[in-house]
């Protein structure tokens, strides 16, 4: 069974940086757009960032533009989310997702993407 394995979450302070990782199989990784979403308590899931299979194109949610960077390491079959200037508003469970369609990732409202990870909790204290 294909899995997405997230790691890197934790407790940080306002202004700190943190890097999340999401690893999967080569077969999955090489042919899919990879993305990060997040869900804060009592809030809807929010798109954070995505990167195409080639790595040529990246997309960001408005709330993280300029602070977060998504990247992928094809040799390690891993996608990263480098987060900086963190604030308490960034506190959420962060989920990795994968789908063959970039459009579906960018437009999804029901979360029906091919693969989802279990999530990793990021808590930013004030």
Image (spheres, grey):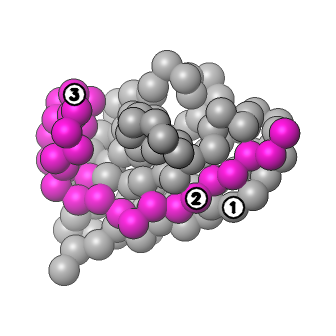
List the single residue furthest toward the front: 42
What numbered label is drawn on residue 45? none
Q: Earlier in the sequence, mark 2 or mark 1?
A: 1
The kind of secondary structure element at disc 2 is strand
Give the SS element for disc 3: helix
- Residue range of the region highlighted in magenta in the rendering: 98-126
Q: Secondary structure at mark 1?
A: strand
Q: Horizontal and vertical percent for residue 110?
A: 19, 39
* In contact (CB < 8 Å): disc 2 and disc 1: yes
* Lower sequence index among marks 3 and 2: 3
The dot on residue 107 is 3
Q: Is residue 102 visible?
A: no
Question: Is residue 95 shown left or right of residue 28?
Answer: right
Q: Residue at x 49, y 51 (%)?
A: 94
- Which residue reaches farthest top? 62
Q: Earlier in the sequence, mark 3 or mark 1?
A: 1
In this rendered view, identify the residue nearer to me: 80 or 10.
10
Does residue 26 appear in the picture of this structure?
yes
In the image, what residue occupies the spot 55% across and 67% down? Answer: 7
State the separation of the CA atoms marked 3 and 2. Answer: 24 Å
- Mark-to-mark CA distance, 3 and 1: 29 Å
Residue linked to disc 1: 10
Residue 25: give x, y in percent of width and height. 29, 72
Give the labeled residue for mark 2. 121
Residue 112 located left or right of residue 60: left
Is 61 rendered above or below residue 96?
above
Mark 2 is surrounded, within 10 Å at the Cα level, by few (under 14), some (14 to 19) or many (20 or more) other residues, namely some
């Amino acid at each position: 069974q294909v899995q997405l394995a997230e790691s890197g979450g934790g407790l940080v302070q306002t202004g700190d940086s943190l890097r999340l990782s999401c690893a999967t199989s080569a077969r999955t990784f090489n042919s899919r757009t990879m993305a990060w979403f997040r869900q804060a308590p009592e809030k809807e899931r929010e798109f954070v960032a995505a990167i195409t299979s080639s790595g040529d194109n990246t997309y960001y949610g408005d709330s993280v533009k300029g602070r977060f960077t998504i990247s992928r390491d094809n040799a390690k079959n891993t996608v990263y989310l480098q987060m900086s200037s963190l604030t308490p508003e960034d506190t959420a469970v962060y989920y990795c997702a994968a789908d063959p369609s970039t459009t579906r990732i960018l437009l999804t409202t029901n979360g029906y993407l091919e693969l989802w990870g279990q999530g990793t909790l990021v808590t930013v204290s004030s």
